[in-house]
Image (spheres, rainbow, N blue to C red):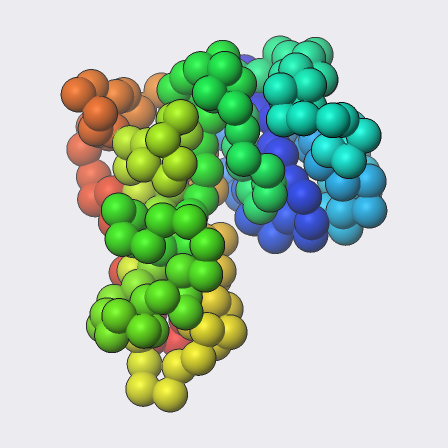
Amino acid sequence: MKNIVILISGRGSNMEAIVAAQAAERWPARIAAVVSSRPEADGLAFAQSHGIPTAVVDHREYPDREQFDTVLRQTIDGFAPDLVVLAGFMRVLTPAFVAHYAQRMVNVHPSLLPSFPGLKTHQRALEAGVKLHGATIHFVTADLDLGPIVLQGVVPVKAGDDPETLRQRVLAVEHQIYPRAVRWFVEDRLSVAGGLASLTPPEPQWWFATEQA
């Protein structure tokens, strides 16, 4: 039985999707805790309503990233995690923190990496004129948004899209692919070699949205 700790900063809609999938599909894992960088995060109430332990490490209480990360790491480790899941966790983590959870921490990024790392991905996708956009689940490394890719979900860019309509369609895909990637980890199907993540037994590590998405 693996322990999953999910980090959030706001509503945590991807956290909700993972919690729902774990309960419905009965993974050999449990959501050991939800940890937030903000005490006002709406996702804390959702977790508590589902009987999941919660904790808050308020980044505003620490003078620098190193001290925040130290306390955050101690808090997470108190729940003995096998996997740390970043689900809308809006903090840049230090290399030491990332190294501590090497190949045990995943993130979702709202673009088809390596395209459009960083912020404002939907606006940048529209400005670039790409015809396909989407989201990427990847292992976290010290290089921001450049860790081994686990799974990607693809949506079409439609005529008349603006950043918000595109964001909503990509978010729907995130809710599909993130639980799938977490389940792969729980089932010991993921491995990393040469900077690439592979799946055993193999199956497509991409997912195309339906037109309705």
Q: Position of residue 183 (x, y in %)?
A: 43, 33
Q: Give me the residue at 46% from left, 73% from top.
A: 163
Where is 69 relative to 89, above or below?
above
Q: Position of residue 145 (x, y in %)?
A: 37, 40
Image quarter (top left, top right, bottom left or bottom right) of the N terminus = top right
Q: Give me the residue at 59% from left, 38% from top.
A: 91
Where is 115 relative to 180, above or below?
below
Q: Position of residue 65 (x, y in %)?
A: 63, 26
Q: Give me the residue at 53% from left, 18% from top.
A: 97
Q: Position of residue 185 (x, y in %)?
A: 40, 26
Q: Residue furthest front?
A: 63
From the viewer's perspective, tell me whether residue 141 is left or right of residue 12.
left
Q: Give me the residue at 50% from left, 69% from top.
A: 168
From the viewer's perspective, tell me whether residue 77 is left or right of residue 108.
right
Q: Residue furthest bottom?
A: 160
Name the quadrant containing residue 24. top right
Res 110 seen here: yes
